[in-house]
Image (cartoon, rainbow, N blue to C red):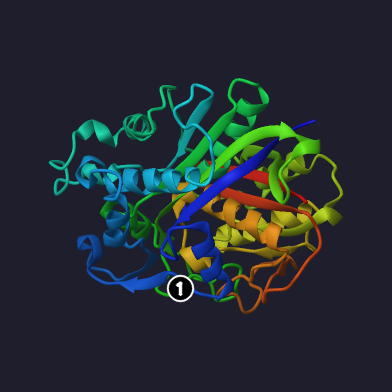
Amino acid sequence: MKVVYNITDNIISSLGFTTDENMASISQGRSGIELHTDEFCIPEYFQASLVAHEKLDDYFRRFADVSRYTFFERMIILSVYEAASRTNVDLSSPETLFIISTTKGNVYLLDPEHTHEFDIERVNLWSSANEIASFFKNQNTPVVVSQACISGVSAILAAKMYLESGEYKHVVVTGGDMLSKFIVSGFQSFKALSPHRCKPFDALRDGLSLGEGAATIILGIDNEDYLPSDSISIKAGATSNDANHISGPSRTGEGLYRAIMNTMKGDDASGLAFINAHGTATVYNDEMEAIALSRAGLEHVPVTSLKGYIGHTLGAAGLIETIISSHSLLNGQLINCLGFTSLGVSKNIQVITEPRRFEADECLKMVSGFGGCNAVVLLKKYS
């Protein structure tokens, strides 16, 4: 049987510029979320996880001109570059496809303060995608997945489809989002941001913490009998839509429940080591996820959210958190839900309060987003 598997990956966030740096910070219980004042000319203070811009530019200057690319594009190019440097995958090959996931891309260029910096066409996601693929001399038309906060997982599932079709040998799934006045003030207008570091699933949760970052997974396809040792495969996945509200999730968890059931397809849940939830720490999202997990018969499976470590990284969230889940699966170590103290949802889900070992070889990654969209991916460890 052909298997789609993770060849290599990279994470760029406030916690580091490699997957190893991010995993080390998380294992130490570090959070990249900090209080920001007078950022983006926004008068209100807010908590967020920001990438070190000057440090990233110092890395980028080693192989490219900083002035030619926006910060959003630089993050993604550096992430792809770092991931690919550990493989012999030919990024310029016609057998390699680029898929870029993001929610807002270069939307900051619409701000009058920034319109002069680049051609306004760069606001278009396809334009940035072309710049990224062209940097690596890839001639295929890149695919853009912009599906609110499920973009990253949707991009992974699209890559799985392309690889299984035999059309490509490798797919570079990369994505990211940068924070800006447009994004932060938008969430502030919803009254969705917490004045404190977010507390997913906690009784005292009062909103989300934003984050920025980028991530890359290079996927390939191989025979199940000949996979490299300690590989992570994309076993299954599904998407759905609540058709409920432009920003509010379904109160019954119907869409996420269906995505979970379509992903599991009757598989025994006893093989699940953990579930990495979306876990935004907003009242309605966390409750919806708890209801969906309960309806799917998964209340007994350990659950965590990574938002307390890196914030909500929007179009990068599904990618970053899938990578972290993959390495957690490889390491056999549960990651505790940072910020959680006492259960604040109506269903008795098993939120992870401290790191501990496990033996199972599968996990679920869930995401949900504006417009009622949901996506789930099932990861499997091969030893």
Q: Which one is in front, 305 or 373?
A: 305
The residue tagged 1 is 197
Left or right for 266, reference 162: right
Left or right for 131, reference 139: left
Residue 101: image x %, image y %? 46, 40
Q: Is residue 245 visible?
A: no
Q: Which quadrant: the N terminus? A: top right
Left or right for 228, reference 129: right
Residue at (54%, 23%) from the top-left corner?
Answer: 95
Task: For label 1, count other residues whose C-alpha is less than 10 Å away and answer few (under 14), some (14-19) or many (20+).
Answer: many
Residue 141: image x %, image y %? 43, 23
Callout 1 amino acid: Arg
Residue 24: image x %, image y %? 54, 69
Left or right for 286, reference 235: left
Secondary structure state at the residue bearing disc 1? loop
Residue 223: image x %, image y %? 76, 33
| Displayed quadrant of residue 100 | top left
Q: Which one is in front, 264 or 170?
A: 170
Using the image, determine if residue 334 lies above or below residue 378: below
Residue at (60%, 75%) from the top-left corner?
Answer: 340
Using the image, determine if residue 274 lies above or below residue 381: below
Residue at (42%, 70%) from the top-left corner?
Answer: 33
Residue at (60%, 63%) from the top-left corner?
Answer: 305
Using the image, determine if residue 79 lies above or below residue 53: above
Q: How many marks?
A: 1
Q: Is residue 9 visible?
A: yes
Q: Which one is in front, 130 or 220?
A: 220
Residue found farthest to the front = 88
| Displayed quadrant of residue 189 | bottom left
Using the image, determine if residue 82 lies above or below residue 171: below
